[in-house]
Image (cartoon, grey):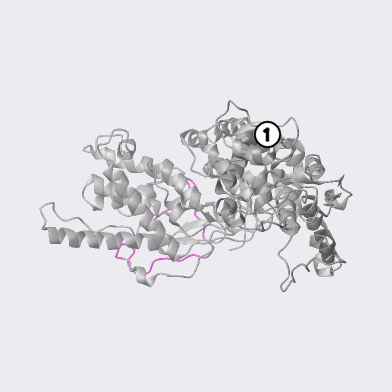
Amino acid sequence: MFSAVRPPAQKDPDDTELEAQANLERRNQRMRGIEFCLVFGCLGVSCTGVIETVPGGSSTRPGQSAGSGGTSASASGNPSGPMNPATTPTSEPMNPASTPSNPSDPGNPATTPSNPSDPVSPANATGHYALRRLTNQEYTNTVQALLFTQQTPGSTFQESLPGGSGFTNDSQALDISSTLVATYYTAATALAKEVIASKGAAGGAYAKLVTCDATNAACASQTVSTLAKRALRRPVTAADLDATSGLMAVFSTSGTFDQGLYDVIVALLMHPEFLMIPVVDAASLDPAAIFKLDDYEVASRLSYFLWQSMPDDALTVSADRGELHQPEILRTQVTRMLSDPRSTNLKNILRDEYAGLLSLARTDLTQLGQTNTLRDAMLGETDAFLADIIANDRSPLTLLTGTQSFVNKTLASWYGLSFPADQNASTFVPLIGNRTGLGSQASVLVNTAGGSPTFTNPIKRGHWLASKILCLNPPPPPPNVPPLPPASQTSPTVRARLEAHLSSPACVNCHVTMDAVGLGAENYGPFGQWRTTYADQTPIDASGTLPGVSGSAGTGFADSASMYAALGSSNLAKTCVATQFMKLALSRDLTSAGELSDASAVGAASVTPTSRLSDLILNIVTTNEFLQQTGEAP
């Protein structure tokens, strides 16, 4: 809805330069007001995930009723008059998120576009997906797809930090502040200018967006309508395009086609349905309601899961046909999307956030006595390992059982492997080594070692293993926890010193598992090389027992190699693989017993030696958690 978005009228082309500059400044002031009007004024953002508009516009799907509850704000005064950004919120963050919720399984396939308000049996209750903004990387990927640009504006935004799910796309963690909104506006104007500047360039953004004769009266409406559907990721409504209060009003006020296109691009890039991934349904305000997502919402959820970007034309066509609740169609789409180059974005988020290696990429290993060439080789191994799983649709169990090390000559030498003489030294080639799974790769071992060039920290490694591989999610430590005591004659080893945690009631619940697996990794030194003794020649005891499911006895292991090998047969670890992918897909944590049970079922069915990654993805995107929504009180 754009009832408050009317750039001032343009002067005649023969205006004086001074008048033209004054007019430009007035238009810029008005367009700067769009950011506040759209995000803070014209459009009320409900914390329950519903987007609502003030009278005069609509952000509901065709045939839907608009939400009527939730916390919303509206612009005061004349909605078509000038906005004063100084009267809007300035520095307080606005969190459009709500609390996470519950579980279930697949909804009935639809052969026509699904009505999100269709009731669903309470027995199939599912969780609540809170309204969230795009992550910085999702924003960059989306504007690159939408406007055919190579700009990376998300890299200039305030950093997106992981939420309780462990991923930056967590709907509980993605706040919006007026500072971020102002940054959005700066990016929007730069992107719009680039499009207009490409006019005349063969194959440029302008030529791709304007595919008709701009002198033809119908071309403006065609261009705006097509762009708006892609930007908003849904069909446009009459209200969206309204000539007095919608996008065509924004377009026509400037007087020229190019200026109108510029203004529409800026307006769309500031639209909350572009900046956020909403569920647009009044039922979302009813905590007792359980309803299906519509096909366009499913398309967005799928594309931002696998690509961290907007749906492409093929996915949108499936949404137009109303077939994205059908498992066979979803399988076709999942297979297609995993084979698309954009699945590189899935690999990147698994590398940076699941494996947690973004911090290692920012670490200067020369400060620890090693080279950044070695660091890059370690990161390259994990990157190639994850890319291989996706590109070849390997079993997700490979994350736990893979024995191929993807090494260049630098890392092969570090691991003690013979690098093929006929290979380029910088090429990553798969070699069989004595390591098993993602957790035994040098990148993860270095990143979780604790930052010392001589000592490892079993608590940090144990925390990573417990949270990322076993999904036991240890809580933050209580305040004022003293550091480990130094080595002494009575407690000469780190294992002996860690036993202090097990004697403290405040620590034992977390550390009994965390310390066990952290100590189980002790055969790997601070930089990931195998060792059997500490520097003082004290033998390393890395033996222990993995936790079992529901407190049952787990598998014992004698050293680090056998611990990582045992993870491949651990039902707890297999379930955790499914859980991690589900959290990424749903943009939230799994919090209820039902959701965790569903994740366990998905893991049992799809994290097996004979399954493929596409099987895991399909089994996730056909759950009720993915296809449905539970309402929440405003």
Neighbours of disc 1 within 10 Å: few (<14), some (14-19), many (20+) = many
Residue sitting nearer the eye, 102 or 142 = 142
Pointer 1 residue: 615
Left or right position of 49 against 157: right
Point out residue 342 in the picture as x, y percentages from the top left corner: 51, 37
When the figure is inspected, residue 312 is found, relative to residue 493, above or below; the finding is above
Under tag 1, what secondary structure?
helix
Q: Quadrant of the N terminus?
A: bottom left
Point out residue 323 in the picture as x, y percentages from the top left corner: 56, 34
Please check the rendered image and state whether residue 80 is part of the magenta-colored stretch, yes or no.
Answer: yes
Question: Which residue occupies 69% across, 55% down?
Answer: 449
Question: Which residue occupies 20% across, 60% down?
Answer: 23
Amino acid type, label 1: Asp
Residue sitting nearer the eye, 634 or 545 = 545
Residue 335 shows up from this direction: yes
Task: State which region is magenta.
Answer: 56-82
Question: Which residue occupies 45% across, 53% down?
Answer: 155
Residue 115 shows up from this direction: no
Among all residues in the image, which is located at the extreme bottom? 480
